[in-house]
């Protein structure tokens, strides 16, 4: 867990506040907003592709069922 927290801290996704022997971590909202904006640009592209992929899988399943029933 400490390795993952160190990575998040290096990437400025969290802040760390020492309190005695403990370290308190807090999420920073700014990097998550930036990440969300970046992903939003690709979301429409991937949703369309995944919709077509799902339709192709469904068609393949229907075709397979038809072949099995016609035997």
Image (cartoon, rainbow, N blue to C red):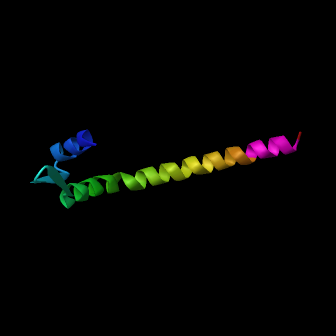
Q: Using residue 66 as the reference point, say whether residue 9 is left or right of it.
A: left
Q: Which span is picked out in magenta?
A: 63-70
Residue 1 is situated, as x and y percent measured from the top left of the image, at: 28, 43
| Tag count | 0
- Residue that protrudes farthest toward the front in the picture: 21
- Residue at 88 percent of width and 43 percent of height: 70
Residue 44 is situated, as x and y percent measured from the top left of the image, at: 41, 56
- Above or below 29: residue 65: above
Q: Using residue 7 as the reference point, say whether residue 71 is left or right of it.
A: right
Residue 58 in the magenta stretch? The answer is no
Can you say which quadrant of the picture contains the C terminus?
top right
Magenta portion: prevailing SS class: helix
Residue 42 is situated, as x and y percent measured from the top left of the image, at: 36, 51
- Residue at 68 percent of width and 48 percent of height: 59
Residue 24 is situated, as x and y percent measured from the top left of the image, at: 17, 55
- Residue at 81 percent of width and 46 percent of height: 66
Q: Quadrant of residue 26?
A: bottom left
Residue 66 in the magenta stretch? The answer is yes
- Residue at 23 percent of width and 45 percent of height: 5
Nearest the viewer among 15 and 46 is 15
């Amino acid at each position: 867990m400490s390795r993952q927290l160190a990575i998040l801290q290096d990437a400025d996704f969290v802040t760390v506040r020492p309190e005695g022997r403990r370290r308190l971590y807090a999420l920073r909202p700014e990097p998550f907003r930036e990440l969300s904006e970046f992903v939003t640009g690709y979301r429409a592209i991937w949703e369309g592709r995944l919709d077509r992929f799902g339709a192709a899988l469904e068609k393949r399943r229907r075709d397979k069922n038809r072949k099995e029933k016609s035997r």
